[in-house]
Amino acid sequence: MKQTIPVYDICSLSMGKDQQDLLIERLNHYLLNNYNKAMHQHGHSFFHLVLFTKGSGTHTLDFTKFNVQPWQIYFMIPGQVHNWNFSQDTDGYVIHFSETFFRSFLVQHDYLERFPFFSGNSKDQVLMIPLTERDEVKALFEKLLTEVEIDMIRVVMLQLFLLIERTSVKEKKKAVPQQKLLVLRNFQQLINKHYRTIKLPKEYAELLYITPNHLNALCQDLLGKTAGELIRERILLEAKRMLTNADLTITQIAYELNFQDNSYFNRFFRKNVGITPDDFRKSLNN
C-alpha cells in the first residue's frame, strides 16, 4: 500500500544537522527551511511542540482546525498528522524530541503520559499561556536555545512541562489509581496495534484479562467514553488519514481497514462523521 502522508523524522527537518533525538529552534528560522513541508498534511515520528509569540494563521491537528494566536502553545505526539498555514510574521519557538530522549533519564518511562497535552487528544493539546506566566515560559525557551548540556536541557524541558500543566491546563486531572491508568494505557496501545483487525470491546477485554463490563466502566470513568467509542475513533482517524492520499480509492481504504465491503465502510463513516468518505475527501481539497 502507498503511504498515506509523509512522515518525517528529526533528521529530515534539521537541514543537514546530525540531530536524531533533539531539535530546538526559533520558529521563524525553522519555517524558512521547512514551510513547504509544514503547509501540507504530514506526520512526525517524534514529539513536537511550538510556542507562538507573534503571527496568525491556522493549523490543523488530526483534522481539527485551530486559529493561531500569540502565546498559544501546541503539542503533538508521534503518529499524529497536521499541517500549518501561517502569516509571514509568525515567530516563536519549536522543539522536537524523540520517544527515547527521556527514556534513560526518567525512572518512570511513561512519565510524559501524565501530562494531558501529551494525550494524543487534539482538544487537550492546544493551550494559551496566561499573561502572568509568559515571561517565565519565554525565559525557559531562551535557556533551551543556549544550553548545551543534554541533561540540563531535559531538566529545563520538564520544568517547562510542569509549569504549563500548572498554569494553562484548565481541567485538573482527578487522582486515579495507577492500576486503572495502566489498564487504560494498555487498552489504547492494543487499539493502536490491532484496530484494523479487532473491532469489538469484548475481544480487547480478553487480551487484557478483564471483563467487557469492567473495560467499559473504566473508559467511562476516566475518559467519559465507552470502549467501543475509543475503537471507532481510532478507525475513523486512520480512515481520514488515508483519505488524504488521492491515490487510494475508497474501496482500497475499506479493504485496508478490514471492512467487509465498500458499502459497509461508507455507512460506518457516514454514521460517525456525518458525511461520506468521498465528501470528506472533497472537503479536504476545498
Image: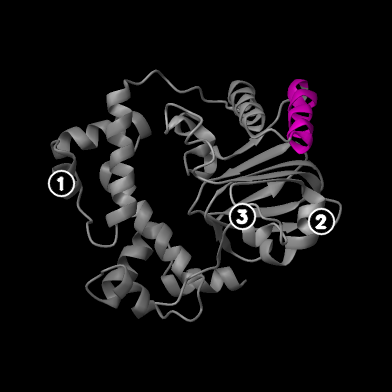
Q: In the rendered structure, does residue 138 fall within the stretch colored magenta?
A: yes
Identify the residue at horizontal 67%, vertical 38% (top origin): 73
Q: Residues within 10 Å of mark 1 (few under 14, many from 20)?
A: some
Q: Image height check: is 32 above or below 208?
A: below
Q: Residues within 10 Å of mark 2 (few under 14, many from 20)?
A: few
User: Where, by quadrant of the figure, is residue 263 drawn?
Assistant: bottom left
The magenta stretch spans which residues?
A: 132-147
Q: Position of residue 133 (x, y in %)?
A: 74, 22
Q: CA distance from mark 1 to mark 2?
A: 48 Å
Quarter of the image that includes the C terminus? bottom right
Identify the residue at horizontal 37%, vertical 73% (top origin): 253
Q: Image height check: is 126 above or below 131?
A: below
Identify the residue at horizontal 48%, vertical 54% (top origin): 79
* Tag of residue 179: none
Name the residue type under label 1: Lys
Q: Check disc 2 and report its element: helix, strand or loop.
A: loop
Name the residue type under label 2: Ser
Give 223 or 119, whichever is nearer the viewer.
119
Q: Nearer the viewer, mark 1 or mark 3?
A: 3
Residue found at the very far top of the displayed protein: 175
Q: Position of residue 35 (x, y in %)?
A: 74, 62
* Tag of residue 87: 2
Q: Image height check: is 198 above or below 109?
A: below
Q: Position of residue 82 (x, y in %)?
A: 58, 57
- Where is mark 3, residue-wise? 10
Q: Check disc 1 and report its element: helix, strand or loop.
A: helix
Q: CA distance from mark 1 to mark 3?
A: 39 Å
* Tag of residue 202: 1
The answer to whether residue 144 is visible is yes
User: Which tag, 1 or 2, sits closer to the chain's start?
Assistant: 2
Give 48 or 261, whichever is nearer the viewer.
48
Identify the residue at horizontal 31%, vertical 70% (top origin): 265
